[in-house]
Image (cartoon, grey):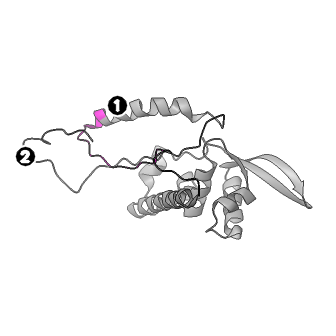
Amino acid sequence: MDTAALLLHPVRLRIVQAMLGGRELTTADLVAQLPEVSPATVYRQVSTLADAGILLVVDEQRVRGAVQRTYALDVAAAQVSAQDIAALTPEQHRQGFTAFVAGLLAQLDAYLASSTSDPATDQLGYRTVALWVTDEEMAALAAEMSAPVLRLLNRGPGEGRTRRLLSTVLMPDRTTSPPPGGPGPHRAP
């Protein structure tokens, strides 16, 4: 099974998202983080991801006669190639995007349910802006946005650090066409 097919599954995608940021978690930890998913499903999907090399065993301990494994995400193995993306059908894109959005909603629900959530202090934000850009301008913007993210990507937990999730969605807007004479005046978002 290719990486795209593995990650199109909503529970497997949520497991991968939970592992981001260099986290090392046991299956029991993942069960606690995904309370709406049955433990049997979490165990089965962790096994599938481990068999595919997306999750790596980084520690094993005997707990009450059973072996408890701690996993880490192999980020390189979890990458979906441009070829895999190009081969997806429109329905597979819908399925993947639905799993992605469902994961975001579950993370937001868990955050808001916490007694310590403070959206203003925690800088919770979400927005959509429309940009009129050429393919070349979009590529340059993506490169400019990637540089500071890549500098922070490999930092682990530390004093004063909070694990934050940064999710992006970029897609052409096919619902409108440019007005005659161009896009009109620019207004800052």
Query: What residue is at 34 percent from the left and 31 percent from the top?
Result: 140
Q: Pinpoint residue 105: horizontal percent, then vertical percent.
A: 49, 60
How crowded pointer 2 is (Cα within 10 Å; few <14, some 14-19, many 20+) is rated as few
Q: Secondary structure at mark 2?
A: loop
Q: Is residue 129 covered in magenta?
A: yes
Residue 6 in view here = no
CA distance for labels 2 and 1: 26 Å
> In this rendering, would 146 be left or right of 12?
left
Q: Quadrant of residue 154?
A: top right
Q: Is residue 76 covered in magenta?
A: no
Viewer-proximal residue among 161 and 107? 161
Q: Which residues are magenta?
A: 123-137
**Residue denoted by label 1:** 140
Exactly how many numbered labels are in the figure?
Answer: 2
Q: Quadrant of the N terminus?
A: bottom right
**Residue denoted by label 2:** 180
Pointer 2 or 1: first along the chain: 1
| Identity of the residue furthest to the right in this view | 65
**The residue under label 2 is which amino acid type?**
Pro
**The residue under label 1 is which amino acid type?**
Ala
Establish if 155 lies above or below 46.
Answer: above
Residue 182 in view here = yes
Query: What residue is at 65 percent from the left and 36 percent from the top?
Result: 156
> In this rendering, would 128 be left or right of 168?
left
Q: Pinpoint residue 90: horizontal percent, then vertical percent.
A: 38, 61
